[in-house]
Image (cartoon, rainbow, N blue to C red):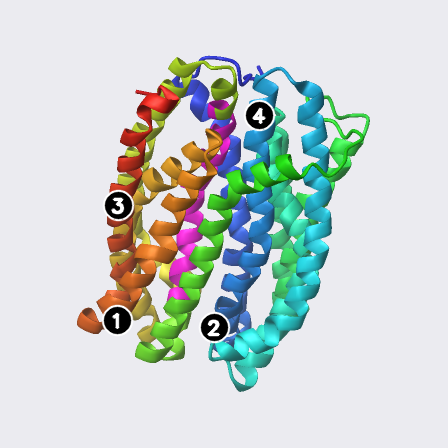
Amino acid sequence: MTIQLSEHFTYKKIFRFALPSIVMMVFTSIYGVVDGTFVSNFVGKTPFAAVNLVWPFLMILGAFGFMIGTGGSALVAKTLGENKKEDANRYFTMLITLVVILGILLTIFGLIVVRPLSHALGARGQMLEDCVTYGRTLMIFNTAFMLQSVFQSLFITAEKPRLGLIMTVAAGLTNMVLDALFIAVFKWGLVGAALASGLSQCIGGILPLIYFLSSKNDTPLKFVKTKLEGKILLKACANGVSELMTTVSSSLVSMLYNFQLMRLAGQNGIAAYGAVMYVEFAFIAVFIGYSIGTAPIVSYHYGSENHNEVKNMLQKSFKIMSVLGITMMVLAQILASPLAKVFVGYDKKLFDMTVHGFRLFSFYFILAGINIYASSFFTALNNGMISAIISFSRTLGFETLAVIILPIFLQLDGVWLAITVAEICAFVISISFLIAKKEKYHYA
């Protein structure tokens, strides 16, 4: 039975509604993980380091789709909650059109700057060429990647999370199969890895577009005549800017991590960080997927002024995130060795560095889910400013300072512990805003 946004949500209903989004995000994270696994084991350590060096830049370009998806879906869900269906469809159409245009422009920009940027990050010789090869090939599919990010959120708003899940699982499976075929069988190297991810992104981004355009679309969201509405567009982008800032900040911080690790441990440091981050992508995807999956519920009830349900979602979600955070940390400690072996088991020194680093790094999971949800919660309430402050402080603010300062005293261990220190500081910010705004939004 389909769960509607207007219902009261018990723990069971929350999990049923959010599960497709969680699985969607886990499968989305698989792109980089699968590419990294095949590249590391079949192409080599230098290409693997090159993928890790250029990947944050590719994520920054794709993050604009995530911004429009989360901010736009919150606005559309709130508008549906206000029973303004025609306005919701107009906003929906405008946002998708914007993504396509912006995706093309960002692709052109990325193709031009990937070489000088890779050089500025320290890539030289073959590593530089590998960065350019992988980056330019995957960048061709940036518009599809952005559309995929948008539709992940909009499928939930359209009350079709399972269909969104099917699309994403199909994309993830395609990526796995094509990676094996292009890299292991055809020996296409980095070009094969990029093509595998790019083609799977087309399934996750283009097929949903076709569905919403088709006569089989039985959701509340339809493509209609629209025009550029600057005020609405600005509101959607401002509302989703925290998600953009999260990805951009995380990507910029990843570049800083790579710089510090190159300085402290050389190419092995970047390869170890890459392996840690691939596993972290899959773990953190659970938190992000839950936040994306439940945000339209909060937006809908906020729009319909059902304050009790907004309070219900906040209380239950904080308990869920706390349990998940502790569970993730324990799993990371237990699985550090076998997971590292998947990526870098062929090199003993690199393997030992990766296991040690991941075990220190994993303590940040305890608070990460709460901070991610707090930011998403304010996005759902259409308060993009507070959401952005939380996201900005936990990544570009606190984490940047930590990754610069801690290695001075702790050397390489300081790099691995930086993110935990940043999450502790961000937790204080999150709780402070939740307390300060409880009267305005009536959730306490």
**Mark 1 or 4 closer to N-term?**
4
Tell me, yes or no, if residue 406 can be seen here. yes
Give the distance between the C-alpha atoms of the residues marked 3 and 4, in whole angstroms: 36 Å
The numbered disc on residue 77 is 4
- What's the residue type where badge 3 is placed? Val
Q: Residue at x 70, y 40 (%)?
A: 96
Q: Secondary structure at mark 3?
A: helix
Q: Real-space Cα distance between discs 1 and 4?
A: 45 Å
What amino acid type should be assigned to the residue bearing mark 1?
Answer: Leu
- Looking at the picture, how far across and down is residue 226, in whole percent? 77, 33
Residue 330: image tag: 3
Alpha carbon separation for disc pair 1 and 2? 18 Å
Callout 2 amino acid: Ala
Question: Given this view, does label 2 or label 3 mark the residue nearer the observer?
Answer: 2
Residue range (magenta): 273-298
Mark 1 Cα within 10 Å, few/some/many (few <14, many 20+)? many
